[in-house]
Amino acid sequence: MGNPLGMRALEPEDKSGLSSRSEQRYIDEKAKKVTQALCEYVFPAMDLDRPDEGTRYDGVTFLELQRYLGLTDTAANQGTRLFNEETTRENGGPDSDTHLHYIKRLDAMEIASMVNGAIAEMVDVGRKYYSIDRHVDVAIDITYIAYYGDRDEFQMSTGAPSNKSYSWCYQMATISIVGEEVKFTLGMRPLLRRIPYMSRAVLVEQLLDIASEHVSIGTVYADAGFDSIGVMHAVEEAGFSYLIRKSSDDRVDRFVDGMNHDVAVKQTHEMEKTIRGETVTVTPTLVGVPSDRKEDATVTFVTNLTVSDATKEARGRTRRVMRRYARRWGIENSYKSIKDFLTWMTSRNTAVRVFYFGFAVI
């Protein structure tokens, strides 16, 4: 699941053989159940900082409108008109300018905290249907969202990775539960240019703090973008296991070239760096295993999990441990779901972009 509602309203059902009209009724019924859940558990945790008296619309109306924009994938101008035609509220709903006005007054980090607070409410609800009291594995990642507008007026814009089809983007960091039974987002953080450079280590510390309030963390998974001494040190200091894709460098290349088996382990891969004026040393285990995606290729990881290549049986166990990394790919489905609910927009306002993403997470 891309959002963390974890409630029976969103459990899959057999929809085979439905006509288009029946399928639409099914979608409408599910949307109503999701809306009911949002109204009961989520909306009370989200405060648009509007006056308590003397206003035509209460805060819930704005949130219902935002929900409608996400479900219909319409921009604010068109979506507010359609919402007014369909809502049963006596006063209708706000126009697009009014809706965006109150969002723009919010601070981006305040929005993230508000969204994380709403997620906390949903995690509590999710406990009724899923066992999340035990250790859970989590994945930390950054999602890239294409941006085509004026970069000077948008403080989140940054260059997109070379493998993307667009040149500019903005970034959102998330931490998500990954497992066989349930996948959902536990917390988010926007990456803002106006904030002095935030290291990956600080970002990871913040996300782990958020997630630790809700669940007991087992192993932390991350891609090569988080392959840094600071990140490993932060996870170790927090007391968690980690499994991180190792990017290539001269030492890693020599390790791969010297592998005698398809699975190899270097127990002490010492790495050192000065961080915040202090020398930080980590000694992860470096592991090489066959790629599941490319023939005759080796992928490398760093981990503090117990692994070995001493025997054939040990190498088999190590390979199975490394395959746990595939759980991280489950968050790709989460991101797809988030982007499915990400309201279409052209706004260059940071608060609007962060609010829309946060609401899609919910």
Image: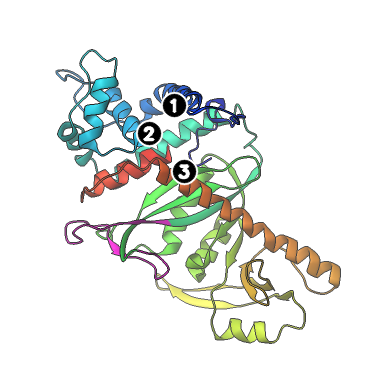
Residue at (39, 71) in percent of width and height: 162
Q: Residue 326, can we see it? A: yes
Q: Is residue 103 above or below residue 36?
A: below
Question: Residue 161 in magenta?
Answer: yes
> Which range of residues does the magenta coloring cover?
143-165
Residue designated by label 2: 71
Residue at (42, 26) in percent of width and height: 38
55 displayed left or right of 254 = left
Image quadrant containing the C terminus: top left
285 displayed left or right of 362 = right
Disc 2, SS: helix
Q: Which of 323 and 194 is in front in this view?
A: 323
| Percent position of residue 59, x then y | 27, 25
Q: What residue type is labelled 2?
A: Leu
Q: Residue 337 carries which label?
A: 3
Residue designated by label 1: 31
Comes first in the chain, label 1 or label 2: 1
Q: Nearer the viewer, residue 283 or 317?
A: 317
Q: How far apart are marks 1 and 2 (CA)?
A: 8 Å
At label 2, counting other C-alpha atoms closer than 10 Å, the crowd grade (few under 14, some 14-19, many 20 or more) is: some
Image quadrant containing the N terminus: top right
Residues tagged 1 and 2 counted as in contact (Cβ below 8 A): yes
**Magenta residues: mostly which secondary structure?**
loop
